[in-house]
Image (cartoon, helix red, strand yellow):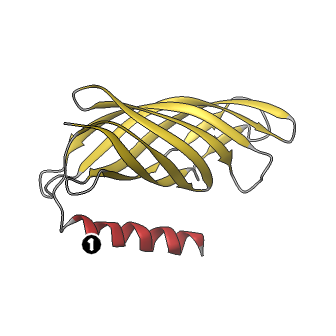
Amino acid sequence: MKKLIFTFVFAFSFLFINNLRAQSYNSAVGAKLGGWFVGTYKKQIKENWYVDFYAGFYGYFSNSLIAGASLEIHKPIESVEYLFWYYGGGASVTTGYSQFGIGINGTLGLDYAFTEIPLNVSVDWMPGFYLSGYYKGPSFGLGALSVRYILGQK
């Protein structure tokens, strides 16, 4: 059911995106929603390079927390004006069931920022590997729809 809702929101976003123009942004703050509920702060560090910092609740357990950062390199999608895809990777720390975990992750996603309203929307997949903790081992289920308020516009 959650996958169906995520797919619907993702498809609806593209319908809405086609009616607006995009813009670049320096930084944005908001939430990532998916298998987790985290706050996110995305900051441009140089042209087409961003760092996404996040922290909040991980998985479906209220006692599990995650904090991390991912470096993302944005590339335009030529066939769809103002839409970017990105890739990168990062690291995170987790707590769950009184255990501390350290993980590394990849990132693959789509990003869009609107001109008419200060809003950024992205969807990503973050496969990873946890070196320790309750979630030790590979993780292929992390991904999120992020909605952020743009703080620094160009």
Q: Residue at x 80, y 46 (%)?
A: 63
Q: Is residue 46 above or below residue 87?
A: above
Q: Residues within 10 Å of mark 1 (few under 14, many from 20)?
A: few
- Helix, strand or loop at disc 1? helix
Q: Residue at x 43, y 74 (%)?
A: 8
Q: Is residue 10 above or below residue 111?
A: below
Residue type, numbered disc 1: Leu
Classify 27 as above or below 3: above
- The percent position of residue 58, horizontal first and vertical second, equals 67, 47
User: Residue 28: where, in percent of width, then height?
Assistant: 38, 40
Q: Nearer the viewer, residue 74 or 147?
A: 147
Q: Quadrant of residue 11?
A: bottom left
Residue position marked by numbered label 1 in the rendering: 15
Q: In the displayed structure, does residue 111 sit left or right of residue 51?
A: left
- For this orientation, the residue located farthest to the top is 46
If the image is split into quadrants, where does the C terminus sit? Answer: top left
Question: For this view, does 138 lie left or right of residue 69?
Answer: right
x and y, in percent, of residue 34 in the image = 56, 58
Image quadrant where residue 19 sits: bottom left
Residue 90 screen position, x and y as percent: 50, 29
At horizontal 58% and vertical 70% (from top left) the residue drawn is 2
Number of numbered discs visible in the structure rendering: 1
| Residue at (13% x, 55% y) in the render | 81
Q: Nearer the viewer, residue 107 or 81?
A: 81
Relative to residue 7, is residue 11 drawn left or right?
Answer: left
- The residue sitting at the right extreme is 98
Q: Quadrant of the N terminus?
A: bottom right
- Nearer to us in this view, 117 or 54: 117
